[in-house]
Amino acid sequence: MQINFFQAYVVTLVIETSILFLLLSKGYSKGSILKNSFIANSFTLPLVWFMFPLAGLNYSSQIIISEVFAFITEFLFYVKLFDSIHIKKAVLASLLCNLLSFLTGVLIYIMF
């Protein structure tokens, strides 16, 4: 089963916001985490879904490049949006968020 953009957006927000809560809740408010997750994902996911497919790359290259883009871009958003976040924590947060949301999408595709 292939999910649509809105479904992917909701799944991504749930997964990535949950990971951010786990990693950042001691230093940042729930509202800040929720808002910043929403901002970062609202920027990257539409580009990954709608713009990267237009690049004319083969599917594997498109996935690799778009996922690296999402990781780097969300890392930069976290550095900018979370006051005084340590660079290593921002890298870890972006890496885990994007890896787990990507793997969840793969699992959904395989299972349904």
Image (tube, rainbow, N blue to C red):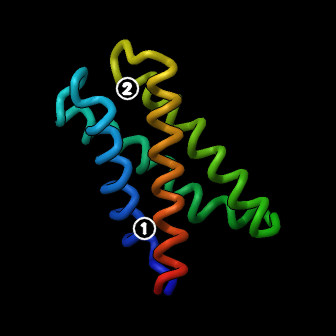
The residue positioned 33% from the left and 38% from the top of the image is 20
Q: Amino acid at mark 1?
A: Ala
Tell me which numbered mark, 1 or 2, is placed earlier along the sequence: 1
The circle on residue 90 is: none
Query: In the picture shown, does residue 68 fall above or below 53?
Result: above
Among all residues in the image, which is located at the extreme top?
Answer: 84
Query: In the picture shown, does residue 90 fall above or below 51?
Result: above
Q: Is residue 93 left or right of residue 60?
A: left
Q: Position of residue 39 (x, y in %)?
A: 37, 42
- Residue that carries the numbered disc 1 in the rendered image: 8
The residue positioned 45% from the left and 24% from the top of the image is 89
The circle on residue 81 is: 2
Image mark count: 2
Q: Is residue 105 left or right of residue 37?
A: right
Query: In the picture shown, does residue 94 fall above or below 112?
Result: above
Q: Position of residue 93 (x, y in %)?
A: 44, 35
The residue positioned 18% from the left and 28% from the top of the image is 29
Residue 64 quadrant: bottom right
Q: Secondary structure at mark 2?
A: helix
The residue positioned 49% from the left and 32% from the top of the image is 92
Q: Amino acid at mark 2?
A: Leu
Closer-to-camera residue (84/19): 19
How far apart marks 1 and 2 lie (CA) works out to 23 Å
